[in-house]
Every structure is written in C-alpha cells, then in structure tokens.
Image (cartoon, helix red, strand yellow):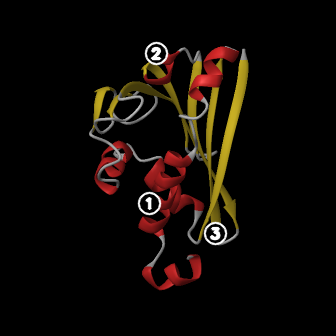
Amino acid sequence: MVSYKLIAELEVAASADDVWGVIGAKDAPQFFMNALPGMFEKIEILEGDGGVGTVLLIVYPEGSVPLTNEEKFVTMDDCERLKEILQTKGGYLDMGVTFYMETFKILECGNSCIIRSIVEYKAPEEVAAKVSSLISVEGLLLMAKIVAKHVVKPEASSIAA
C-alpha cells in the first residue's frame, strides 16, 4: 500500500473568515457548480444540508475519468477553517484506490490568508502506478482561485494578481 499527499497553496488578499465564508458555506456545492461552468456536469446533494454528513453525487463532463463519484463532508470546522471531503463511492475507489480525501484548510496571515488544498490517497502499488497520472490537486487549486476571485475586492485584485 502506497500513500500520497498532494498539496497546493494559494495566497489570497482577503481575510481567512471571508474565504471560509465561501468554502465553508452550506451552499458551497452550488457556488462551485455555478462558478466553474464546464468543470462539473452536475453536483447533486443526495443527503444532508451542506454541513457535516452531506453526501454529494458529482458528475463530470462526458469523457472525464472518473465520470462520477459520491463524496461526503466528514469535517466542517469553523474554528480551524477546515473542510474534509471523503470519496465514498465510485470515482477513484472503483479504480482500486482504497482511500481518497480532499481537504481545504484556510490559514490566517495578517490581512491575507492562504488556502491550502490537499489531496490524500492510498492505493496498492500496482493501482497507484495506473492512477497517479489521473490524480492531482489542480482541481482544488482551480476551486481556490475561483474563491479568491470572488472574495477579493476589485480594487485589491491588481495587488493579488
């Protein structure tokens, strides 16, 4: 069994609370669906209200690998500004990955903050060799950039760019 941890960080010229207000919001799935046209075919809430325990069905555009998966919000910590999303069905699990988790952690840095995006997964060596080229943190980083664009005030965007 091999474990992987992929991390990307994005500094944002906005408060950690403002960024968490988007990522930690109960309507975050709908926000990302609307803000990233083409990234998702559909995001459907199967269970829950957007908080801990919420189960989502994610459908990606035709030709994507994987095409669908279900994921569950397992941590939503307002104090730590931490959101952990566990893939529970389909997706990389159908390809032999035994554990797949995505995490957003918002770190306060004075008047700005850092969005730390993390993808962690475990797989048998032979499976890891096949899926490692498919799994990256780029999707989470794109989501972080959309949040940053949403919360940064227009007059500050030239500083953040």
Query: Residue type at mark 1?
Result: Ile
Q: Which mark is residue 17?
A: none
Mark 1 neighbour class, 10 Å CA radius: few under 14, some 14 to 19, many 20 or more:
some
Q: Secondary structure at mark 3?
A: strand
Query: Residue type at mark 3?
Result: Ser
Q: Which residue is mark 2?
A: 94
Is 9 in front, or is 52?
Answer: 9
Where 7 falls versus 113 (above or below)?
above
Question: Is tag 1's residue or tag 2's residue first in the polypeptide sequence?
Answer: 2
1 vs 2, front mark: 2
Q: Position of residue 64 (x, y in %)?
A: 37, 35
In the figure, is residue 38 to the left or right of 18? left
Look at 58% across and 82% down and name the residue there.
Answer: 159
1 vs 3, front mark: 1
Q: Which mark is residue 146?
A: 1
Q: CA distance from mark 1 to mark 3?
A: 16 Å
Is 121 in front, or is 61?
Answer: 61
Q: Which residue is mark 3?
A: 112
Question: Is tag 2's residue or tag 3's residue first in the polypeptide sequence?
Answer: 2
Q: Secondary structure at mark 1?
A: helix
Q: Secondary structure at mark 2?
A: helix
Look at 70% across and 17% down and name the residue there.
Answer: 125
